[in-house]
Amino acid sequence: MPDVAVRVITSARRKKSVSARWVGETIEVRMPEGLSAGERDRHVRELTSRLQKKRAASRVDLVARARILATTYNLPEPSSITWSSRQQHRWGSCTPATRAIRISNRMSAFPLWVIDYVILHELAHLVEPNHSPAFHQLVDAFPEAAKAEGFLLAVSLGHAGTLCAND
């Protein structure tokens, strides 16, 4: 995530709660006065990361992307597709029975072609619920599939570096 200005406001009136919000292009974090430096830093780091991911996610219209990809690759549209902050070990998930797709908001700053690949992967599960050869045939129709898989593998292994900076 890019560096962003953060303003920390402490208050003796606050006893437990910590909150953060965007004020223009600055993240304002409010917290109790008596927190240790370590606790303060942890809250600032976690809350600013969460707000930046949420802002980045808002730039991608998942419903529109899914509609375009479903039409392009002759796949069914999902009943819903949403960003998820609960997926820490998967890039996306699909429930074929309800046709609901969730995309990890950890991907929100990734290049669009990587997000499209994960959406397409989940759309393919609406046709083939497992990772069978027929499933891979659907996913491999995406021209940048191998490149996107490599990108996701690099990120998973902690070698992302500046991968997210270049679309």
Image: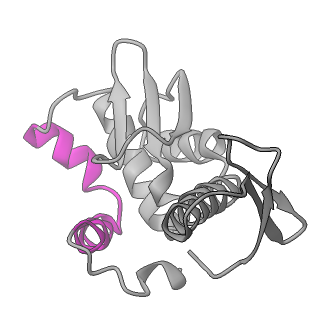
Q: Is residue 136 left or right of residue 60?
A: left
x then y, percent, for residue 20: 73, 53
x then y, percent, for residue 12: 80, 51
Number of on-image labels: 0
Q: Magenta region's main secondary structure?
A: helix
x then y, percent, for residue 77: 51, 29
Taking the spot 61% from the left edge, 64% from the top edge, the residue there is 44
Residues rendered magenta in the picture: 132-156
Examine the image and state in which quarter residue 4 appears: bottom right
Q: Is residue 92 above or below residue 163?
A: above
Taking the spot 19% from the left edge, 47% from the top edge, the residue there is 137
Was residue 59 drawn as part of the magenta stretch in this picture?
no
Taking the spot 72% from the left edge, 58% from the top edge, the residue there is 33
Residue placed farthest to the right in the image? 24
Q: Is residue 33 above or below residue 17?
A: below
Examine the image and state in which quarter residue 156 appears: bottom left
Taking the spot 32% from the left edge, 37% from the top edge, the residue there is 124
